[in-house]
Image (tube, grey):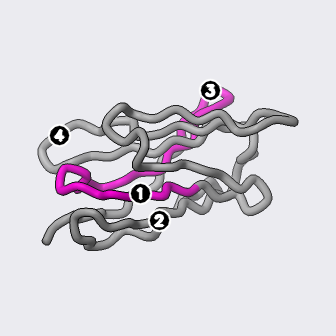
Amino acid sequence: QVQLVESGGGLVQPGGSLRLSCAASGFAFRLYVMKWYAQAPGKERELVAAITSVAGSTDYVNYADSVKGRFTASRDNAKNTVYLQMNSLKPEDTAVYYCNAHGLGRDYWGKGTLVTVSS
């Protein structure tokens, strides 16, 4: 059974940091592109970061322009886990953050974790 379970969300003040985790099971994790999406209230879900494992090389990561220089995505294929380190958080980063696994013609989603940036 495929599972993606996000954790690490919460309430943080502007300028603060959070680290999200997504624990995966039930599929060949290392073969999938792992993505983080954010869905703000009343808005569509948007891609935040995507990380691809490259055999024998550094993982390839791309980011939305809005988070470049502030967010860092990483993955641990031994633990089947993907992370999103979020620094210098802004109120506009408030959203439900979803983990997505994309590959081999399939897409899997987690249920999301809420991040609220507010003073």
Circle 2 residue: 19
Measuring from the top left, give residue 74's x and y in whole percent.
61, 51
Q: Is residue 22 above or below residue 74?
A: below
Q: Nearer the viewer, residue 118 or 4?
A: 118
Measuring from the top left, give residue 70's x and y in whole percent.
40, 49
* Distance in Å between CA atoms under marks 3 and 4: 27 Å
Q: Secondary structure at mark 2?
A: strand
Quadrant location of the C terminus in the rendered image: bottom left
Measuring from the top left, give residue 80's x and y in whole percent.
70, 57
- Given the image, on which type of amino acid does mark 3 rest? Gly
Q: Are marks 1 and 3 in contact (CB under 8 Å)?
A: no
Q: Nearer the viewer, residue 51 or 99?
A: 51
- Residue 112 - label: none
Circle 4 residue: 43
Instruction: Indicate which label's residue lies in the foreground, 1 or 3.
Output: 1
Mark 1 or mark 2, which has the lower sequence index?
2
Q: Secondary structure at mark 4?
A: loop
Mark 1 or mark 3, which has the lower sequence index?
1
Circle 1 residue: 86
- Which residue occupies 79% across, 59% down? 78
- Given the image, on which type of amino acid does mark 2 rest? Arg
- Which residue occupies 37% across, 68% down? 9
Span shown in magenta = 83-107
Quadrant location of the N terminus in the rendered image: bottom right
- Given the image, on which type of amino acid does mark 1 rest? Met
Position of 107 with respect to 70 (left or right) is right
